[in-house]
Image: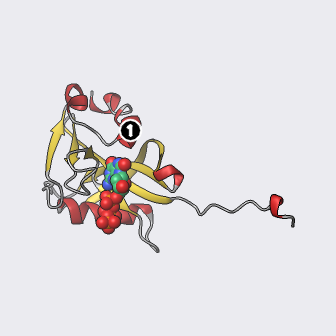
Amino acid sequence: MRPEQYVKPSPSPRVIVAAVIITTGRVLACERSAPPEAAGRWEFPGGKVEPGETEQQALARECAEELGVRVDVGDRVGPDVPLAHGRAVLRVYAVTLLGGDVPKALEHRSMRWLTVDQLNSVPWLPADEPIVAELPPLLR
Ligand SMILES: Nc1nc2c([nH]c(=O)n2[C@H]2C[C@H](O)[C@@H](COP(=O)(O)OP(=O)(O)OP(=O)(O)O)O2)c(=O)[nH]1
């Protein structure tokens, strides 16, 4: 193959899963405490899918670690959102709390339950904007 024909294959993007948790018309929003450039920005709880995990398993693990709750992972919410120049993708799922568990901010600086009218009252991470835009019908 001539050098000009060679196209470097790009590795498949790392998947970041995150949870939309809605109870009685409010969605759970969490304030990051780190890294410094993201601290004070708001997100949905979640994190990286580790090798060997399904996305659902990863999200259940992250909800246990970050919020101390057991969950059922349901349907997708919103589009895949590219992160880090396409090296990662944010994929959000609707999640239901199990057994009356109540989320606690174990790793976040703070958290809030937002009504539809409060959705834009926090500075979301930029990638979350297209997800937040899908929430009003789910909160009404
Ligand atoms: N969890 C989460 N991460 C998000 C959201 N939006 C967004 O851009 N991100 C970015 C921030 C981070 O660069 C990346 C997730 O990293 P993370 O630090 O939460 O992942 P993790 O829990 O697996 O962390 P670690 O093991 O690497 O410390 O995705 C979101 O709504 N939730």
Which residue is more in the foreground, 113 or 7?
7
Q: Amino acid at mark 1?
A: Ile
Which residue is more in the foreground, 21 or 83?
83
Label 1 neighbour load within 10 Å: few <14, some 14-19, many 20+: some
Q: Is residue 49 above or below residue 76?
A: below
Question: Which residue does the numbered mark 1 point to in the structure image?
Answer: 131
Q: Is residue 23 above or below residue 133?
A: below
Horizontally, residue 39 falls left or right of residue 19, namely: left
Q: Residue at x 22, y 44 (%)?
A: 29
Residue 82 percent location from the top left of the image? 49, 47
Q: Looking at the figure, which quarter contains the C terminus?
A: top left
Q: Residue at x 19, y 59 (%)?
A: 67
- Which residue is most to the right? 1
- Which residue is most to the front? 3
Q: Residue at x 21, y 61 (%)?
A: 66
Which residue is more in the foreground, 21 or 123?
123
Which residue is more in the foreground, 98 or 8?
8
Ligand 1 closer than 8 Å to label 1 CB: yes
